[in-house]
Amino acid sequence: MIIRFFKFTKFPQIITSLIISFLIMLAFKDVNNLASEFYSLSFLIAIFFLSLFIISKNSILKNNQYIALGLITFCGIYFKMPSNISTTASCFFLLLSIRKIYSLNSNKKQNKKLFDIGFWFLISTILNPISLIFIITIFSGVFIFYKITVAVIFKILTGLLAASILIFFFYDLTVNTSNSPDVTSYIIDYISLTYTSKAIFLSSDYRHWLFASICLVTFFYYLFRFFGNNTSERLKNLFLLIFFINSILLVFVINEYSIFLFFPFLVTLIKIISEIRSNLFFEIAVLIVIILNSYPYNF
């Protein structure tokens, strides 16, 4: 059935999933604003490839040949939801920071990794200040895979400062200095506005909670079945759990932030598929989900 196609070599899967993702975008997004939607899709694909790299590099999944199916399934939901380029780009840079956290397992270039964690996290926060919420994920990950000391915090803050200086010079070169926003005030004001805006806070249309609810059930099924048989796997899944909780709390409140669920959704869905791929009922369930994705409802 449908899952069997994704047992073959990865390159055909990736090409197929990219084409299908593009067609899904055309089906559900505003063709009058195609350029903006295409940029959003491009960032989503970049997030997909970065997720592939993180998963493969850190052995998060031993069997990930079904991963392209995860992209198609996610796209069917994602392109029905409100989204913007800055939010998608923010997720991409957040994942760059997450990637460095996973790599702290290795003892190579630890100072550079800690610097990069702070640097990419600040870029993510500038693009969408709501990402500041993931500071919990960042420091929890450093604690899980490395340690938290004054020196470690200082190195992360150095990365944050370097990114701040870079952005300051960018504004100085491209925008009149007197009109350049104060970064700290901008982040605080944005988060305050986000959580007090009736337009996006706890929307009365609860249909946008559907995907987050499905992710929640899928993730906890994954934790129950595949939390890990050794310390290394358990630490990786503990960090994934923290990242997921951070994301799910955000998504339940603000529907356009579903992109932050992509990485944990990809890991958990593909692990489940690879483990119970011979189950006919599960194959039918996946097929039904894909068919439902083709229904042009809007969250």
Image (spheres, helix red, strand yellow):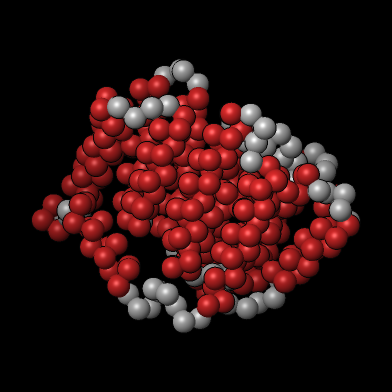
> Residue 185 location, x and y as percent?
18, 56
> Residue 3 location, x and y as percent?
82, 52
> Residue 279 location, x and y as percent?
86, 53
Can see residue 71?
no
Quarter of the N terminus within the rendering:
bottom right
Q: Nearer the viewer, residue 215 or 292?
A: 215
Most extreme residue toward the bottom, as rendered? 204
- Residue 242 located left or right of residue 224: left
Q: Nearer the viewer, residue 120 or 168?
A: 120
286 above or below 50?
A: below
175 above or below 167?
A: below
Q: Quadrant of residue 146?
A: top left
Q: Nearer the viewer, residue 201 or 24?
A: 201
Q: Residue at x 30, y 27 (%)?
A: 149
Can see residue 198?
yes
Q: Residue at x 56, y 76 (%)?
A: 207
- Counting the numbered discs, the total is 0
Q: Quadrant of residue 297?
A: bottom right
> Residue 136 location, x and y as percent?
38, 46
Q: Residue at x 72, y 40 (%)?
A: 64
- Residue 65 located left or right of residue 164: right
